[in-house]
Image (cartoon, rainbow, N blue to C red):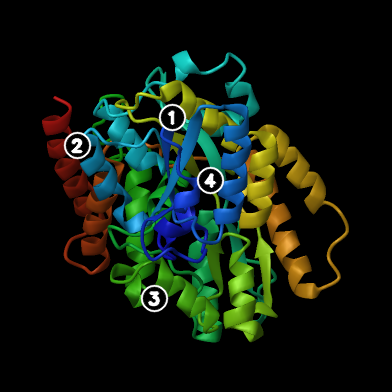
Amino acid sequence: MPLSRRRALGLLGLTLAAGSCSLPAARRSAPDTRQLQVWTLDLAPRFTPFLERVIAAWEARHPGVSVRWTDVPWSSVERKLLAAVFARTAPDLVNLNPPFAANLASKGGLRDLMPLLPASAAAAYLPRIWEAGQEGAAQFALPWYLTARVTMANLRLLEQAGLERPPLRWQEVPAYAEQVRRRTGRYALFVTAVPDDSAELLEAMVQMGVRLLDGRRRAAFVSPAGRRAFAFWTDLYRRGLLPREVVSQGYRRAIELFQAGDLAQVATGPDFLRNLQTNAPGIAAVTAPFPPLTGVDGDANVAVMNLVVPKSSSMAPEAVSFGLFLTDAANQLAFAEEARVLPSSREALQRLEARLSEPAAADPGEALVQRARALSVATLERARVLVPATPGIKRLQAIVYTQLQRAMLGALDSDEALRTAAGEWNRYAEARWP
């Protein structure tokens, strides 16, 4: 999700590196050492000191092995990694998001980590997060950092609309959106239907009870729940209760509208408040965090960043060792505090939760961020990866969004759009998984 939603999962709204960034020459290995190649996504330069500390600590425990760290821009990681895999020059450990990792795993490009992991490894991580790194019986990823969205709401718009809080469930949204639109002239929310942008709409469909795929990876969404979900979004758009740009602009537009005071709520991470306090202090002053929208079962979404080992690595044991060290409780807690993200380590999460339960900061802005972070941590209790890291999931999103757009714009009705999406996906799936 860029500071569009896709990038927010990976970058968390942080300063981006302009290009690939490696450690300075002074940190490169001596000729008599083995070199472990590690890639991360958009962490330099802000987190260079953190990564250098972790690398130095690990190297001190592993004489004869040095780490060469390269930070790769999100926009180019797939191209760079695929090129490296084909050229047999892939790194030993790579920071990836689950969908791309799952695609590589399904094509035999990633190593199953189970034979290299200690028996106690899984117990160190949150169970649902650990399971999100599996493909069949194989464990292809170590979980690293997480983001769990909360709802940021404009209290002034809610008051003008005669409302005390934003909705908690998707079924409350139509009446809420109509009330906000009628009484304020603004919009309640912005959920993009742009195919290559945020997965929020697909996640919402899952929260509405839609099963996306069956055990053979064929479309399972032509169902009563699927029909209701397609009709839900089509109806909201046709009634003018969603901004017209949801079919043409991505998540970044939601942020722009919220900062302008034209949107009652936005789903985002707690650190968004810091940017809001800088970019739109007047809106920040009337913004408060609330629990995220969920379905009837109360499940919220969590986004995961993983570490994987390409199958071609000749240093897989060392790569797993470094991955476990980078994601241990102490290092995860330190990174979570610096990056304002959530750890996947159980121990680190417990320690972070204890810190956030301490008396609030005296500064109102800091106190608000602390409150939002505590709410985000609490959300993890009922959070899971709603859209599983299934191979081809981005293609599925593109197909579903494109057909839903057609229904929103009146080119066909929502049921026909649903059937068309299922047919298109099944043709793709039958060719890839006969």
Residue 32: assigned label: 1
| Residue 381 placement (x, y as % from top left) | 66, 40
| Disc 2: CA contacts within 10 A as few (<14), some (14-19) or many (>=20) | few
| Residue 287 placement (x, y as % from top left) | 66, 74
| Disc 1: CA contacts within 10 A as few (<14), some (14-19) or many (>=20) | few
| Disc 3: CA contacts within 10 A as few (<14), some (14-19) or many (>=20) | many
- Which label lies toward us, 3 or 1? 1
Q: Dot 2 corresponds to which residue? A: 87
**Do the residues under discs 2 and 1 have CB atoms within 8 angstroms?**
no
Q: What amino acid type is highlighted by mark number 1?
A: Asp
Q: Earlier in the sequence, mark 3 or mark 1?
A: 1
Quarter of the picture containing the C terminus is top left
| Disc 4: CA contacts within 10 A as few (<14), some (14-19) or many (>=20) | many
- Which label lies toward us, 2 or 1? 1
Can I make out residue 103 in this image? yes
Cα–Cα gap, marks 1 and 4: 43 Å
Q: Earlier in the sequence, mark 3 or mark 4?
A: 3
Q: What amino acid type is highlighted by mark number 3?
A: Pro
Left or right placement of residue 359 versus residue 364 in this view: right
